[in-house]
Image (tube, rainbow, N blue to C red):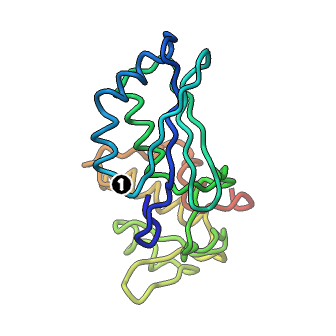
């Protein structure tokens, strides 16, 4: 790979055996695809190395004095060409195991989740709960349930709306909200263990 316009791979040594069975693919690669590989990569020095009685391998030398060795025994010419291309495209740096799943230079602007934060109530409940004492109103018109509000009031309003047959969750009258007890609804809306 080019770093700031400079290819990092300087030299590629193709080691093979002239009579071994595991070198059959690399011999075919040198006859058919290696000349084209050299033409396409004039910045790269490609050297053939005869090592009898050993398995074939590709050895890459990079500008940062690192080297990589790839064993290519019993591979066909296409697979060896793929390995040579991967060595050419690599920067030569050591492989680092990622300690986290997400690596970024820009950390998340969302922040951490807080249980005291206000929570949005869906549109059907806005008019019903906004009139209830203890709820807060947002400038956009959405109602919020603050940490200080009483979740029992919210549960009662939800059960009243579900019982009256209103489309609470957008399912066309077939609400997924439970009609018996409403414990799931209250837990889902309140997000607070001590109010349940």
Residue at the far right: name it: 194
List the single residue furthest toward the left: 172
Rate crowding at label 1 as few (under 14), some (14 to 19) or many (20 or more) other CA atoms within 10 Å.
Answer: some
Q: Please name the residue shown 39% across and 52% down the image.
A: 162
Q: Is residue 124 left or right of residue 109?
A: left
Compared to 82, does 162 lie above or below? below
At 58% across and 24% down in the image, what residue appears? Answer: 51
Q: Is label 1 in a helix, a strand or a loop?
A: loop
Left or right placement of residue 51 versus residue 10 in this view: right
Q: Position of residue 87 (x, y in %)?
A: 48, 45
Q: Which quadrant holds the C terminus?
A: bottom right
Q: State whether residue 15 is above or below residue 149.
A: above
Q: Which residue occupies the foreground of this view, 37 or 187?
A: 37
Q: Could you say where residue 84 lies in the image, as x and y percent from the top left?
A: 43, 40
Q: Where residue 37 sits: x, y (%)?
A: 32, 42
Relative placement, left or right, of 194 versus 69 is right
The residue that label 1 is drawn on is 169
| 114 vs 99, nearest the viewer | 99
Which quarter of the figure has residue 54?
Answer: top right
Closer to us: 163 or 127: 127
Q: What residue is rendered at 47% in x and 71% in y?
A: 120
């Amino acid at each position: 790979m080019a770093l700031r316009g400079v290819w990092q791979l300087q030299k590629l040594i193709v080691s093979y055996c002239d009579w071994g069975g595991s070198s059959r693919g690399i011999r075919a690669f040198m006859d058919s695809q290696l000349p084209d590989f050299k033409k396409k990569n004039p910045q790269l020095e490609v050297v053939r190395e005869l090592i009898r009685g050993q398995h074939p391998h590709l050895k890459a030398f990079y500008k940062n004095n690192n080297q990589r060795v790839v064993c290519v025994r019993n591979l066909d010419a296409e697979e060896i060409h793929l390995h040579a291309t991967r060595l050419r495209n690599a920067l030569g740096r050591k492989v680092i195991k990622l300690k986290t799943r997400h690596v970024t230079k820009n950390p998340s602007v969302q922040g951490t989740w807080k249980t005291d934060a206000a929570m949005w109530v869906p549109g059907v409940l806005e008019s019903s709960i906004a009139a209830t004492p203890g709820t807060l109103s947002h400038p956009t018109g959405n109602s919020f349930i603050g940490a200080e509000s009483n979740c029992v009031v919210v549960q009662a309003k939800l059960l009243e709306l579900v019982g009256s047959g209103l489309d609470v969750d957008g399912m066309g009258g077939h609400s997924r909200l439970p009609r018996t007890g409403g414990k799931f609804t209250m837990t889902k809306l309140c997000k607070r263990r001590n109010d349940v």
